[in-house]
């Protein structure tokens, strides 16, 4: 038996509308210094709660639907150093800080995959029509992106929508700091390719077959994964920029010659990529363990091979980085550098 809409899930959208239409009666008027944090709080809880408000759900599944705590979602939004912070002083854009941001984003990606793996594949999510949308997935993603666009998410260069058509403009003022990146970054968006890879290749590898009826929550979790992976890949803007600044003499000849292959060779460090693959696999081992009081459960053998049950196969996370994340990040870097002298 299905119930009507879950009323509390309208809260983030209602608060946002009140903030926009009647700022005089909103807490933002009193705490002007925290208006951006408040909007991003609404943004952080919007994915899960808005998704659940858009579709009816079973009474029996409301309490079982995994909804991350607001505090953790806010931290996820703020975990990577934002370009606007770096732009206050170009000296702060260093290769080490960019590298630390990429390492931090590994944690997010692993946790998002674990959350999505809590649901079965739920194939109707991607085929069942709703309203004028071809699927529940399209409906949830487009609706969420519209809300996040108004809250200013896509003013950040590495945050890119998957359905950019007809998105409403941001209701926040543009960043006051001068940009760190070359304007060419705005023309580089690999999200169509990322979406295709995720739905057709990656998702069937870690989501078990089955249907539990939680289509809205499933689509919202998919969007969490996609946004984390996309952010990591498009952070290649900053990798390319900092490498170019550190050694322009190494990159300018290949840029002027529009030599893609030459740039790719300059950007490829096989030993570093192997270290990344090992690190994310180890994180998946640690983060994805089935916790037990038995000391023998989820042990790791002396030779480093995994022996135990995990929420997401650690070797799959390593494969995700080796086959898709790092190659696409380098594609972003190459495309950026080809335009860097324009």
Image (tube, rainbow, N blue to C red):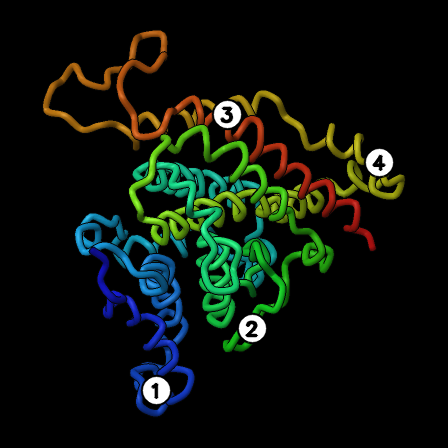
Q: Nearer the viewer, residue 124 or 47?
A: 124
Question: Separation of disc 3 and disc 2 at Cα?
Answer: 36 Å
Report the mark closest to the observer, 4 or 2. 2
Look at the numbered disc 3 and give the secondary structure of its residue.
helix
- Left or right, 255 with respect to 275, comes to right
Vertical order, 281 against 216 (above or below): above
Q: Provide residue 64's location: percent of width, then percent of height.
A: 20, 48
Q: Which of 305 and 242 is in front in this view?
A: 305
The furthest residue to the top: 303
The residue to which callout 2 is attached is: 168
**Rendered image: mark on residue 259:** 4
- Left or right, 66 with respect to 330, comes to left
Which of the two labelled residues, at mark 3 and mark 2, occupies the earlier sequence position? 2
Tag 4 near tag 1, CB within 8 Å: no
Tag 3 near tag 1, CB within 8 Å: no
**Rendered image: mark on residue 29:** 1
Report the mark closest to the observer, 4 or 3. 3
């Amino acid at each position: 038996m299905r119930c009507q809409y879950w009323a509390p899930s309208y809260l983030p959208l209602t608060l946002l509308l009140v903030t926009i239409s009647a700022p005089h009666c909103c807490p933002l008027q009193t705490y002007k210094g925290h208006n951006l944090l408040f909007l991003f709080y609404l943004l952080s809880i919007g994915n899960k709660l808005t998704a659940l408000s858009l579709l009816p759900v079973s009474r029996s599944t409301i309490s079982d639907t995994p909804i991350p705590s607001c505090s953790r979602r806010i931290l996820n939004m703020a975990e990577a150093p934002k370009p606007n912070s770096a732009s206050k002083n170009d000296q702060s854009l260093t290769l080490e800080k960019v590298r630390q941001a990429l390492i931090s984003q590994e944690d997010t990606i692993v946790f998002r995959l674990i959350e999505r793996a809590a649901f079965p594949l739920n194939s109707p999510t991607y085929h069942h029509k709703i309203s004028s949308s071809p699927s529940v997935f399209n409906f949830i993603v487009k609706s969420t992106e519209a809300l996040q666009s108004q809250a200013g998410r896509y003013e950040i260069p590495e945050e890119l929508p998957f359905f950019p058509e007809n998105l409403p403009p941001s209701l926040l003022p543009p960043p006051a700091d001068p940009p760190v990146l070359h304007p060419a970054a705005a023309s580089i968006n690999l999200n169509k390719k990322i979406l295709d890879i995720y739905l057709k290749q990656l998702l069937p590898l870690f989501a078990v077959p089955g249907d539990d009826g939680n289509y809205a929550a499933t689509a919202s979790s998919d969007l969490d994964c996609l946004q984390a992976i996309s952010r990591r890949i498009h952070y290649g803007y900053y990798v390319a920029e900092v490498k170019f600044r550190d050694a322009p003499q190494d990159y300018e000849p290949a840029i002027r010659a529009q030599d893609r292959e030459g740039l790719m060779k300059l950007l490829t460090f096989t030993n570093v990529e192997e270290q990344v693959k090992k690190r994310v696999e180890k994180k998946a081992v640690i983060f994805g363990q089935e916790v037990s009081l038995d000391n023998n459960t989820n042990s790791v053998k002396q030779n480093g091979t995994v022996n135990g049950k995990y929420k997401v196969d650690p070797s799959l996370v390593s494969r995700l980085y080796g086959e898709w994340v790092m190659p696409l990040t380098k594609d972003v870097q190459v495309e950026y550098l080809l335009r860097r002298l324009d």
